[in-house]
Image: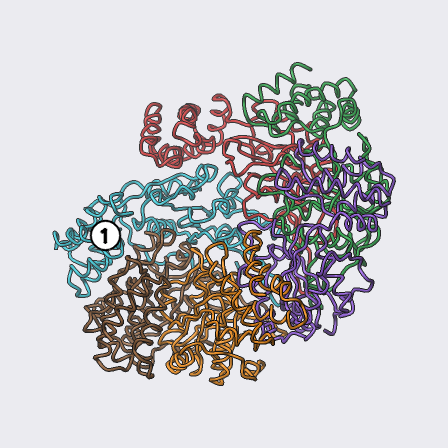
Chain colours: A red, B cyan, C green, D brown, E purple, F orange
Amino acid sequence: MSDIDKKQYLIQDEPYYRPVANEVAMYEAAYAARMPVMLKGPTGCGKSRFVEYMAWRLGKPLITIACNEDMTASDLVGRFLLDINGTKWQDGPLTVAARVGAICYLDEVVEARQDTTVVIHPLTDHRRNLPLEKKGELVQAHPDFQLVISYNPGYQSLMKDLKQSTKQRFGALDFDYPSAEIETEIVAHEGNVERAVAEKLVQVAQRSRNLKGHGLDEGMSTRLLVYAAQLIGKGIDPLSACQMALVRPLTDDPDMRDTLDAAVNTYF
Amino acid sequence: MSDIDKKQYLIQDEPYYRPVANEVAMYEAAYAARMPVMLKGPTGCGKSRFVEYMAWRLGKPLITIACNEDMTASDLVGRFLLDINGTKWQDGPLTVAARVGAICYLDEVVEARQDTTVVIHPLTDHRRNLPLEKKGELVQAHPDFQLVISYNPGYQSLMKDLKQSTKQRFGALDFDYPSAEIETEIVAHEGNVERAVAEKLVQVAQRSRNLKGHGLDEGMSTRLLVYAAQLIGKGIDPLSACQMALVRPLTDDPDMRDTLDAAVNTYF
Amino acid sequence: MSDIDKKQYLIQDEPYYRPVANEVAMYEAAYAARMPVMLKGPTGCGKSRFVEYMAWRLGKPLITIACNEDMTASDLVGRFLLDINGTKWQDGPLTVAARVGAICYLDEVVEARQDTTVVIHPLTDHRRNLPLEKKGELVQAHPDFQLVISYNPGYQSLMKDLKQSTKQRFGALDFDYPSAEIETEIVAHEGNVERAVAEKLVQVAQRSRNLKGHGLDEGMSTRLLVYAAQLIGKGIDPLSACQMALVRPLTDDPDMRDTLDAAVNTYF
Amino acid sequence: MSDIDKKQYLIQDEPYYRPVANEVAMYEAAYAARMPVMLKGPTGCGKSRFVEYMAWRLGKPLITIACNEDMTASDLVGRFLLDINGTKWQDGPLTVAARVGAICYLDEVVEARQDTTVVIHPLTDHRRNLPLEKKGELVQAHPDFQLVISYNPGYQSLMKDLKQSTKQRFGALDFDYPSAEIETEIVAHEGNVERAVAEKLVQVAQRSRNLKGHGLDEGMSTRLLVYAAQLIGKGIDPLSACQMALVRPLTDDPDMRDTLDAAVNTYF
Amino acid sequence: MSDIDKKQYLIQDEPYYRPVANEVAMYEAAYAARMPVMLKGPTGCGKSRFVEYMAWRLGKPLITIACNEDMTASDLVGRFLLDINGTKWQDGPLTVAARVGAICYLDEVVEARQDTTVVIHPLTDHRRNLPLEKKGELVQAHPDFQLVISYNPGYQSLMKDLKQSTKQRFGALDFDYPSAEIETEIVAHEGNVERAVAEKLVQVAQRSRNLKGHGLDEGMSTRLLVYAAQLIGKGIDPLSACQMALVRPLTDDPDMRDTLDAAVNTYF
Amino acid sequence: MSDIDKKQYLIQDEPYYRPVANEVAMYEAAYAARMPVMLKGPTGCGKSRFVEYMAWRLGKPLITIACNEDMTASDLVGRFLLDINGTKWQDGPLTVAARVGAICYLDEVVEARQDTTVVIHPLTDHRRNLPLEKKGELVQAHPDFQLVISYNPGYQSLMKDLKQSTKQRFGALDFDYPSAEIETEIVAHEGNVERAVAEKLVQVAQRSRNLKGHGLDEGMSTRLLVYAAQLIGKGIDPLSACQMALVRPLTDDPDMRDTLDAAVNTYF
């Protein structure tokens, strides 16, 4: 850890996070037991923000890894790089996290190749170590180290799911869109609009979420509501703002667009 | 940014762009909120030109990346190159854009591997950062940085579509062929022909667009009309020019060619 | 073995292992004959812990390799690395194990490409050697060397199974969840809770195991029971602890979750 | 362009080309507008020869790239090579063509991966530039640069076709076998045989072309006729020459061979 | 051959091999004619041991290559490695065998990619040479060189078989499990048990071999019988020894296990 | 050609080749016209031997390339290798052949990836050049250069066939097993047995060839007959020799083996 500053992974300012249930207490107990944690929930409902908030609250560094299908074990663990003196080992982000005692957050873990996820196994049971096979080193995890993964159950396809031998290494917390009350508070705060505007946006979103599985793959996320609010804040009329930020990103189907546009017109 | 000149990415001369609706104002509001933007529309209707125009108008550098299926995360983010002193990190175009505060335009983003697009996620939410995992650096995006993507909804196959967790990070603007009035103006201006010739070419194109889904995958684009106009301007007779620039590129089906040739003969 | 310390592979402290049948004696006889051994059984029932325990008991180093689909023969056997003096051979973990006389444990061997497993063949018959073809060296295994593999029969798919010519090189030991009596003892010891709590957790687990094949892919593992016990030990109420550690990791199906929650409510 | 001589790409001697219609004038107009051109037609009908002829006629260098499925974007655009001073960029043939102002001819473009062809897009619209993403350079095409592609519509499979967004960047010229009159002239000239022999060969070819789709994938090309003429010129009897050069290369089906042999016997 | 010692490939001690028919004489005649030889037969019936025995008997070095799907032509033939003086060629095992005059044994050749096996063709006809295309050298095989391959006909799938043009380069010897008389002798000798015990083990094995195709993929191999005998020799009771060494490795099917256990109980 | 000796590719001694028709004269005329030649015929009927004979007869060097599915364009054309002074270009065998004026023989060309074969196109038409795109050099073929390919029409699958645009670049010569008279002469000469024995072997082979398509993929090749003759010459009884060299290599089907054994018994 000579050339990478552990401090860059500390969250400086308190992230805005609005708790919805007992998730903060549950996570703290899990962290106290260093139990690996899995966050489940739909797109844009606040899973990543929650991990940031907990890392800030616990005062631990956070290393986030966006998983993708091309990610190899070396991308997680590290590799030899060519140097002026020959090859030099460079720790991957998972190894860095294990060494410095960070919370390591694997975002959208189902995207990674099922079998690549096998490399996290020895870090998630009583061993708490990480064999760097290419380097011939066995890294014992720092006492502060914890692993967190996220995944979207509604999104997982038949081809992509976690193996049982991976799932059974994690405690799980469910996430969902917040209640109307809380979501309005979030949209008003983040989008910097009046409460009345935020309320209307949340109502539009709830209509769209009822259409999930009836022509829509997902309803409007809290994140899209914030975008719409921001456009309105920049002086765009609400109808245009909702079309750009809420309706058009969601679907290209003309009928579904009409339905959603009608919902927008109802409230604005 | 010592060896790459930021200035080379600035658009020097005002690009010719003919607005069709409120898209300029909408984009300006989105840029003011640094909201990521998705441009949807058919081939050759002016999406790339619009981004160039907006980059010129806002006075920001523009970095365009033509997406393709073989593009890896490293192609976007950067990689280590071998140097006389060992390996040296070279930023990819996305990283350059994040550092210098450019508008980064991912053209035909559905071509890229679905999961490669995951690397843009932390740049498109409140984090606005880009982890260079291989280098162990977390790049915080320049305040001027914005991400724009384009895609063609009619073209997307079942295999290729953006994930919901990607879609819901963008506001969307729809594009289509311009109205006859505006398209005539464009063809006359760009093809350097008289308005009467441009009018006829636009009428031919509209016929072909009505055949979309009835034997044609796409109608004639504005770009092809400009080509035909240019050939006529070089002294080629209109019938030969239309065959070369409008009919033959579009289809190899003999019946469909006859239909299109007949449309050409009607107007010329 | 100049730069890798053989001692780092010795198990320092006696691992907690609770024998369930004659498996310790059988393994000792197999080791005395240096017979390769295959451990079969479901996820989280103690196979890895058993190998650690036997390595400690026999006083032999243990090298564990988590198999995955991307693992190449070079990952097992070794490769040339670039050095300041040109290329330098680096032994892989299997070669290290053969040289120092370790027990080499290939965890979840069915994950590896069927044909990559061919490289272990000469180490598992009368030859007991490992050809390093790229280096032109034939490594004769140390007299203490033994190979152990694990696999989960219920998990294996049609695509992934060991070849007969591999299977027939191993003696096999079956593993399963321990009896209620023994499992209660384990959960109380590892989870640091009272016997009464452990008993209830084991009863919940047995209910879930009866649902295997009737809506669940696997029942709750001993490992999950220990997690639940630990959460309870941290002051979380038993219902929340069981939801987080037992129910939610296992399934996303609402009906199945209700069934499992009901089982939890019955005992707590 | 210090180490590659632009002159090696200039066609020294006038290639033998026999125009069949207005293709020379059409191409000249397209070149004057720097419009990208697509040549369509069956195997061996003279597309490559035509491009050579036009390059000679216009006095421009010609760089030909035979496309294939393994061709990567780097093969077209360039890559870093290792040098005594570290890595050194080497332009690919497309980049060389853009820099020196050559006509760049992508032969059998449908062979290339559909998405690799995306790299030519910015060279084929108003931008006329080529981003070397790995080098961080934006190459502005030389004013003389033009792109030409060829493809065989009868040959294209369902899997391999150009995308609409690629097709609509090109004007198209159709090619076919020449008329009997012109083809006889070509075979006599190129094969160095008397007109009477050439006439008979052309008649055999026409019979075979009528069988296209009725047991033959393609009819005999002009190139094969020239081969047969050359064998006759070397003293081989016409029947053996036609078997070797016309019949056996085309098909292994015994009935079809009998039919073609009969056609040969009719004329010789 | 400066840095690889040819002597390491000589078999020092006579391997235990029990001939079953005229295979030794046939092989000697084939070797005298340097005819390539193919050994066919089920798993664990003694093919590899036979080759070792013949190499010892003929006093020739033996180089064994375990084939697998990932094996490339370079793995057989050799490659350039990076050295302090640049790249240095390193012969692969096939090239070494051709140079030093070894018997080269390709074990489980059907595992190799069908087309990779093409590289052995010039070594298996009148040419007896090996072109090192990457090095620009044509290696003429040493007069003592001979190629031997093995394959398991019952195992080959529809996807994996040798090409006719490969098959027709080899004389073939069939192998099968030895007769009861001979197998008893082998098990008693190798397993170091009394003849009576060996006899019972062979009877169990014969029962299992009759089940091949009726629920078992393969019967128990001679190798497994030797394992069972060794466990009995270490003091394990025969029933437990047979379960571990004969029944459990073979199948996970409960009914089939009962059937095999019953067979074990019948004899012990 | 400083470090590769052109002379090593010259055939020193006259290869034994027994002409069966006018193939020598046809090939000489094709070579005189530098027409590329395709040799068609079943496995082991003498295609490779014929090319060797013609190269010897014409006094030209011969470079043979065994094609396989993993062969890349670089394997044919050449690549940059790392040297002490950086990278150094190394010609591939096709480039060497083009430079020194060799006959280049691509054996089993259908094995190569269809699209890799595209690289030979410019060498097989009027251009007779080979663009080394990675090196930026255009190699003009030596006047003596000629390309020869072989392929087995009976063997080609639906997936693997030459493209029309490749086929139509070659004159074709058909090969088949020689007549009984000639084959007897070949077997007696090559196998070093009496004419009477050779006659019987040829009769056995003819029986097997009649079974092609009726349970056999191919009949016995001349090469296998020579093997059987050689075994008989080494003192093996004819029945055992025929089993090893003729029957067992061909098929594993018990009924087909009985049929072939019966044919052997009829003649010996």
As rendered, which of B253 and D50 lies closer to the eye?
A: B253
In the picture, measured across the screen, residue A7 lies left or right of residue C53, that is: left
In the picture, measured across the screen, residue E206 lies left or right of residue F266, that is: right
Residue D37 visible: no
Identify residue for label 1. Answer: B186
Q: Residues within 10 Å of mark 1 (few under 14, many from 20)?
A: many
Quadrant for the N terminus of chain C, please.
bottom right
In the picture, measured across the screen, residue D70 lies left or right of residue E7, that is: left
The quarter holding residue E9 reads bottom right
Residue A23: give x, y in percent of width and height: 61, 25
In the picture, measured across the screen, residue A111 lies left or right of residue F27, that is: right
- Indicate the secondary structure of the residue bearing disc 1: helix
As rendered, which of C258 and E128 lies closer to the eye?
A: E128
Residue A239 visible: yes
Count of numbered tags: 1
Residue at horizontal 76%, vertical 43%? E202
Chain to which the residue tagged by mark 1 belongs: B
Up-down: is D224 above or below E260?
below
Quadrant for the C terminus of chain C, please.
top right
Residue E246: give x, y in percent of width and height: 74, 40
As rendered, which of B185 and F208 lies closer to the eye?
A: F208
Residue C150: give x, y in percent of width and height: 71, 41
Residue at horizontal 33%, vertical 84%? D235
Q: Amino acid at mark 1?
A: Ile
The quarter holding residue E173 reads bottom right
The quarter holding residue E79 reads bottom right
As rendered, which of B204 and A23 lies closer to the eye?
A: B204
Residue F12: give x, y in percent of width and height: 56, 84
